Structures are given as structure tokens and as C-alpha cells.
């Protein structure tokens, strides 16, 4: 429908309009771009603007039309709701139009909404209006019609007035009752509004299966859900695991044809009735709030915990609770005046891929990093995004100059979802992955089994710097207060050229550095001196030998008196240790055969770093009367007093062995908060001792 150059032009125009104070001469442009974005969003299921940007454009046009009503032509995007209909289904008319919602983005917007409601309903400003807040589910909208208590029709939202008839598909959903007792309320015919959703973990299973079968993957649960509504074969809808949440009673009449929604006095009461009648309605996710402040707090709370919720939600919906007040408010052609969506900060945005930089890691891996035009994502400005490796770039067919869709979900680091092929104008440049290290010019290598290209020069300055950063970090030598920025600064000053230098710093010079002073220099000295006493497994791990992890370092440390003993070790000596494989063996042997590395370790030792086996390096010997000797143990649910890892370590020290599943082999299950299937299974077995976190700690005498 739109050619690529047209799409590029409309996209650029949209961005310009977002920056411009619009006047009457922009009306046509606004029409054009809004039509385009509706098509991208509803028909292609592939938006190129964030919701926020789309709304801003829409509001600009609305404001313009409010000032100049002659611009409000029948074809204006404000005069209709968008369309998701296809040609594959019968079209049916909704009993009452399914409208959109007006949007808000913060507590301030909600306050304005509350003020508007009070004005419309002639309520004094100092009186409270009660609201119901519920999730704004991000799936596919549905309308269900029941006549004489029987489900007779289901439809998609369509263009709001008419939708696709999908009765057969909805009948397979177990959350859609085929019969429901509306007659108890004197209701003969009713239309319910809701959303068909796919649970997040179910969505992951579906995609995993599609991947195994070589089918294309769904971008998100919403796409999988809207697609699921429209399957030709209802069995396929059933396999998607869709669930229908009902959030609104749209229309109800009795057998005289009289409107009887006033059977309920509030929205809350109506939803409770539906819940009691067999429908799935929001429960803990819904709250009756006594005023707008409480509603705003509930919205903010859900914004903070949306990632942990099982379903995709893109905001909350705030609705006037009293149906009498709702009636006073009425509707615009676009949305009810008594409800508003509170949109969460966008997780996705479009930006431009400006350039690619290459970072060298501590073992020489070359990581491409995209520099993008800064964008706001869920409240954070993002300008750099890792592209992982060369395969990622070719897999996504990324080019410099591409418009890219970026996403940041929860605490997850941002990533590039895709490049927008349809917005290319031919000036985009391929990304040429370097063949030489951008820092030391050594030819890059790539092992057959690995995704990353690596710089094989162990002395490459970039690698040495990364190794020093890792060396001082918590998991390695754990030097308190010695962070990345200090390492970088001292390196720039020429004070740190290798890890040995860390133990020979001039603290007077540090004290004189801007931003330091005597106290912080002293603190650093204390922390470094403390690290000099570390067990040797930490030293071994801190050397950054490829594939030589903490566990292997511990296993090796148990077997030696002194780190430099490893010079005499053969491949065989290493492989003889259970759990150490040939690759690690080879890498460690190679390291200890290089005289530069030996000199480095000797230098460290001369600065006071301990290289002799300590008590902490020796295997944990559990005394025979330790409280959990010979027992197997498993932790489930959230623990509060210790972390899961600490608990497991405590259990080992007390003689237990951690295992990963509930079976007849399990002796003890420690249950934290929200323990689920494991607890059920263990209880059913009847042979497992079940302990709370407190009881477990008490057993260990803590
Ligand atoms: S009420 C007349 N409540 O959001 C009532 N809508 O942008 C208007 N949606 O098409 C809708 N969760 O599909 C309402 N709890 C909720 C909702 C909800 C999701 C969808 C609905 C509507 C769209 C409006």
C-alpha cells in the first residue's frame, strides 16, 4: 500500500511535525502521517512510532481542529477509529461502538482528568470521586454477546463499529463461558468487552516450539494473541493458550428491550458480578480507589512491577466507578469521557543507527556496539546498544543509517529488535566487521565453536585494561571501592600498565589527585592491602585465563601449595582433576609457560600479594556431626534473610548436597515466599522434610 520511499518520507515528516508548533497549513500533513501510522499499527502490526509519539501527533490534530472546526473533514483520522479487519471473516456490527481511550502519562495528567470529571458532573473540587483502576491489557480486543444466557457471538474490535466475527474461535477458550447466568439480573441480551491474552511464559513456549518447527517467531505476546483470534481453524486458536479477560459491560437489555445496565450502580459491582458468573476478570490487579490520588498511586505501583506480571500490560485504565456519573460524562466520538488510560513509559522506540564501535573484552573478544541517536526508553536515555557479535549484525541485516526499533524491558539491557527495511532510502551503508584489532592491529581470530572474533594478542592494551578492571572487581580480587573509573583514570595517568601495578600504587600521588584526598587514598590502600591476603583461587581467577572460571580456579587451588607450582603442571595433571576439561587445561598450561606471565606473578608476589595456598583454598571438610551430613537439600521460593546462593553454601558447609529437583532422592525442601509446584510435589511425596527459611537457619544454629 505504501512504497518504501513514501514510508521514509512519511516517517521523516512525522518526526518534523513532532518538533513543530503546527498551524492550519499542517492539517493535511497530519492527516497523511496519522493514516500511515494507523496502517502500520493496526494492519501491519508493525508500528514505526512509539505510542507516545503517535498520541502527540493525534493530539496536535485534535487541538488544531478544535480551533478551526472547518478542518475537521469526514476523512480526518480524528473522525474514526482504526481498523484491524481482514477479508477472511464475516463482518458484524457491535451493539454499541467499541471506542478507544484517551491517554495520560503521569499523576499530573490524572489530576487534570479528575478535574474534568468534577466539572462535567458538577461536583465541588474538594469532594472525592471514586475510581476503579485495572490493567490496560495488551492483547486483542474482543466483544462477546450472550442472548438468553448463551454465547451467541464473538467479534474482534475491528474499526470500533464493526468487527470480524470469531465466534467459533472464542468458543474454544476455557475462559469464555458458553453459558452464563445473566437472567438472574433480568438481562436478556448483553455485550461484554475484554481482551484475549497469552501468558508471557506460555508465549515463550509457543515461540520455542515454532523455532523447533522452523516457523517464524512472534515479536511479542500481543502479536501471538491477535493472530490467535483469527485462526482459520479453531483448534489452532486453542493451541495458542489464549485467555479472555473481561473488563467492561458494554450493553445490556431485558426482554422488553429496555436498557438495564443500571441493574448495577457501579463499574466495580458489574465486574464482580461477571467474576461470580464465571468470567475471568482482573482481581488483584483491580482496585476500587476512593480518589484520584489513590488511583495514581496504584498506577505507579503497577508500572514498577509490570515486568514481574504474567501478562503484557501497557498501562492501567482509570474508570469513574459510579455508572450514574459515567452517564453524566458521556462520550466523544473517540473515547468515553469517564475513563482514561494511564500509559506506562514506552519500552520501545525508534532511533537511527549512527555508527558502530568495537570494544575489546578481557579475553580479547570483539564486541560491536551500536551508537544510536539518543532515545528515551522506559524513562532512561539510551545511546549505546551492544550488537553482541558479527552474526547478530548479519542476522538482523543491520546497516549504518538504518532506522532501528529498540527495546528495553524492565532491568534488561536495551537491544535492537530490528531494522526497518521499509524506511531505507538507499543511503544506508553495510557494517564492515574489522579483520584486525582496532587497538593493536593484530589479525582477529575466531574459534569454530565460538560466536566472537577475538584479538589473540594477550598484551593488547585494550585487553590489559579490561583485565585490570576485572581483576579488582567483586567476583575477582574484590578490592573494595576500586571501581572501573579508578582503573581507567590510573591507566590514563600511566600508573597502571599491568595487574601487578595495582599492588604498587603511590598513595601520596593518589591523595593529591583531584577528587581524592588523603582519606580516600588511605581507604584504597587498606582495601588493596586486604586483597593481598586473598586465597589463591581468587588470584587464579583474576588472571582472566580464557574459560578458566571460578569453579575451576577453586579446584586447581586445592591441589597446589603455590601458584607458581603450575609452571610444572602438564595437560594431564589438569585433566586428572574431575570437572576440568582439555580446553581449560590447555589455556592454563599455555599461560604458565609464558615467561611474561611468570614475571608478572613474581612481581605481584614481591609487592606482597599472597600466592601460597590458604586455609580458604583447601576443600571444605565437613565434620561428622555437622547438622546436615549426608542429606540432600533444595531451596524454592524467595528467601529473605540470606540469598539463595548463600543458603546453598551454608547447606554445603553443614554437610548437605544441593540437588535441583524434587524426587524421592530429596531429603529437605526449604521454602521461601511464593513457593509453587516444588512445594506441592514435595508435600505429595510425603517423604520430604519441609523447612521454612527461619527453621533452616535455626537448624544451622544461626
Ligand atoms: S475500557 C468504552 N478497559 O484498550 C470502554 N479498555 O485504547 C473503553 N483495553 O480498545 C475500553 N484493557 O481493547 C478498557 N481494562 C481495560 C482495557 C481496555 C485494554 C483496550 C481495549 C480498547 C483499548 C483502548
Image (spheres, helix red, strand yellow):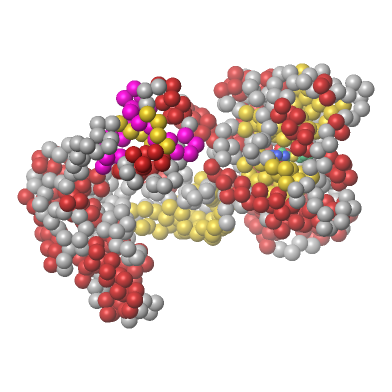
Residue 366 appears at what percent x and percent y?
Answer: 33, 53
* Quarter of the image where the N terminus is located: top right
The residue most toward the bottom is 512
Up the image or down, 456 lies above or below 578; here it is below
Please say whether residue 533 is one of the residues in the magenta stretch: no
The residue shown at (81%, 38%) is 266
Up the image or down, 680 lies above or below 83; here it is above
Residue 596 appears at what percent x and percent y?
Answer: 13, 61
Q: Which residues are magenta?
A: 651-675
In the picture, measured across the screen, residue 520 lies left or right of residue 314, that is left
Q: Is residue 434 visible?
A: yes
Up the image or down, 257 lies above or below 589; here it is above
The residue shown at (73%, 18%) is 179
View quadrant of ligand 1 = top right
In the picture, measured across the screen, residue 351 lies left or right of residue 539, that is right
Of the pair 556 and 493, the residue shown nearer to us: 556
The residue shown at (24%, 38%) is 626
Task: Count all numbered tags in the image, as a single digit.
Answer: 0
In the picture, measured across the screen, residue 539 lies left or right of residue 366, that is left
Residue 553 appears at what percent x and percent y?
Answer: 21, 48
Q: Is residue 364 visible?
A: no
Of the pair 502 and 614, the residue shown nearer to us: 614
Amino acid at each position: 500500500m505504501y512504497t518504501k520511499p513514501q514510508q521514509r518520507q512519511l516517517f521523516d515528516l512525522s518526526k518534523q511535525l513532532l518538533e513543530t508548533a503546527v498551524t492550519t497549513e499542517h492539517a493535511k500533513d497530519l492527516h497523511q502521517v496519522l493514516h500511515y501510522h494507523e496502517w502500520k499499527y493496526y494492519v501491519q502490526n508493525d508500528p514505526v512510532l512509539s505510542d507516545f509519539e503517535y498520541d502527540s501527533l493525534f493530539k496536535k490534530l485534535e487541538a488544531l481542529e478544535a480551533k478551526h472546526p472547518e478542518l475537521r473533514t469526514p476523512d480526518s483520522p480524528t473522525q474514526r477509529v482504526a481498523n484491524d479487519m481482514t477479508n477472511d471473516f464475516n463482518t458484524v456490527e457491535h451493539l454499541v461502538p467499541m471506542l478507544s481511550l484517551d491517554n495520560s502519562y503521569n499523576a499530573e495528567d490524572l489530576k487534570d482528568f479528575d478535574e474534568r470529571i468534577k466539572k462535567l458532573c458538577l461536583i465541588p473540587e474538594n469532594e472525592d470521586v471514586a475510581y476503579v483502576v485495572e490493567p490496560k491489557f495488551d492483547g486483542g480486543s474482543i466483544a462477546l454477546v450472550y442472548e438468553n444466557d448463551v454465547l451467541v457471538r464473538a467479534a474482534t474490535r475491528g474499526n470500533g463499529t464493526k468487527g470480524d466475527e470469531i465466534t467459533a474461535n472464542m468458543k474454544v477458550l476455557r475462559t469464555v463461558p458458553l453459558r452464563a447466568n445473566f437472567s438472574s439480573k433480568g438481562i436478556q441480551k448483553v455485550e461484554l468487552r475484554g481482551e484475549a491474552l497469552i501468558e508471557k511464559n506460555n508465549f515463550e513456549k509457543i515461540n520455542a516450539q515454532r523455532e523447533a518447527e522452523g516457523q517464524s517467531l512472534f515479536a511479542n505476546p500481543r502479536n501471538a494473541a491477535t493472530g490467535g483470534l483469527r485462526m482459520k481453524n479453531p483448534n489452532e486458536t486453542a493451541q495458542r493458550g489464549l485467555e479472555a479477560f473481561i473488563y467492561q459491560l458494554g450493553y445490556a437489555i431485558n426482554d422488553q428491550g429496555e436498557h438495564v445496565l443500571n441493574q448495577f450502580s457501579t463499574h466495580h459491582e458489574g465486574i464482580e458480578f461477571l467474576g461470580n458468573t464465571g468470567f475471568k476478570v482482573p482481581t488483584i490487579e483491580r482496585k476500587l480507589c476512593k480518589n484520584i490520588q489513590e488511583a495514581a498511586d496504584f498506577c505507579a505501583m503497577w508500572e514498577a512491577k509490570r515486568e514481574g506480571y504474567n501478562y503484557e500490560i501497557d498501562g492501567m485504565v482509570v474508570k469513574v466507578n459510579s455508572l450514574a456519573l459515567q452517564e453524566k460524562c458521556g462520550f466523544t466520538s473517540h473515547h468515553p469521557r469517564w475513563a482514561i488510560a494511564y500509559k506506562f513509559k514506552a519500552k520501545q522506540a525508534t532511533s537511527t543507527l549512527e555508527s558502530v564501535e568495537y570494544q575489546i573484552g578481557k579475553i580479547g573478544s570483539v564486541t560491536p556496539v551500536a551508537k544510536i541517536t539518543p532515545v528515551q526508553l522506559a524513562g532512561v536515555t539510551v545511546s549505546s546498544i551492544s550488537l553482541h557479535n558479527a552474526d547478530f549484525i548479519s542476522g538482523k541485516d543491520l546497516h549504518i543509517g538504518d532506522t532501528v526499533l529498540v527495546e528495553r524491558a524492565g532491568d534488561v539491557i536495551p537491544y535492537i529488535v530490528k531494522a526497518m527495511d521499509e524506511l531505507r532510502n538507499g543511503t544506508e551503508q553495510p557494517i564492515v566487521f574489522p579483520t584486525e584489532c582496532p587497538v593493536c592491529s593484530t589479525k582477529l581470530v575466531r574459534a569454530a565453536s565460538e560466536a566472537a572474533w577475538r584479538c589473540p594478542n594477550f598484551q593488547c592494551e585494550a585487553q590489559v585494561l579490561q583485565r585490570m578492571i576485572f581483576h579488582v572487581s567483586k567476583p575477582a580480587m574484590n578490592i573494595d571501592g576500586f571501581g572501573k573509573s579508578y582503573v581507567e583514570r590510573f591507566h590514563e595517568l600511566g600508573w597502571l600498565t599491568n595487574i601487578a601495578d595495582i599492588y604498587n600504587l603511590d598513595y601520596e600521588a593518589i591523595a593529591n589527585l583531584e577528587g581524592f584526598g588523603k582519606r580516600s587514598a588511605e581507604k584504597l590502600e587498606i582495601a588493596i592491602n586486604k586483597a593481598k591476603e586473598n586465597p589463591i583461587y581468587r588470584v587464579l581467577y583474576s588472571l582472566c585465563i580464557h574459560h578458566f572460571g571460578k569453579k575451576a580456579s577453586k579446584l586447581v587451588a586445592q591441589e597446589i601449595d603455590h601458584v607458581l607450582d603450575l609452571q610444572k603442571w602438564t595437560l594431564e595433571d589438569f585433566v586428572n582433576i574431575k570437572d576440568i576439561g582439555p580446553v581449560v587445561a590447555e589455556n592454563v598450561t599455555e599461560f604458565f609457560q609464558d615467561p611474561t606471565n611468570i614475571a608478572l606473578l613474581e612481581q605481584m608476589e614481591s609487592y606482597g600479594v599472597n600466592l601460597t595456598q590458604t586455609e580458604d583454598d583447601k576443600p571444605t571438610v565437613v565434620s561428622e556431626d555437622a547438622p546436615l551430613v549426608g542429606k540432600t537439600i533444595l531451596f524454592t521460593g524467595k528467601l529473605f534473610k540470606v540469598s539463595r546462593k548463600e543458603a546453598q553454601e551454608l547447606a554445603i558447609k553443614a554437610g548437605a548436597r544441593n540437588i535441583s529437583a524434587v524426587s524421592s532422592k530429596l531429603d529437605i525442601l526449604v521454602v521461601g515466599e511464593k513457593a509453587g509446584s516444588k512445594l506441592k510435589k514435595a508435600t505429595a511425596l510425603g517423604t520430604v522434610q519441609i523447612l521454612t527459611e527461619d527453621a533452616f537457619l535455626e537448624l544451622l544454629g544461626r
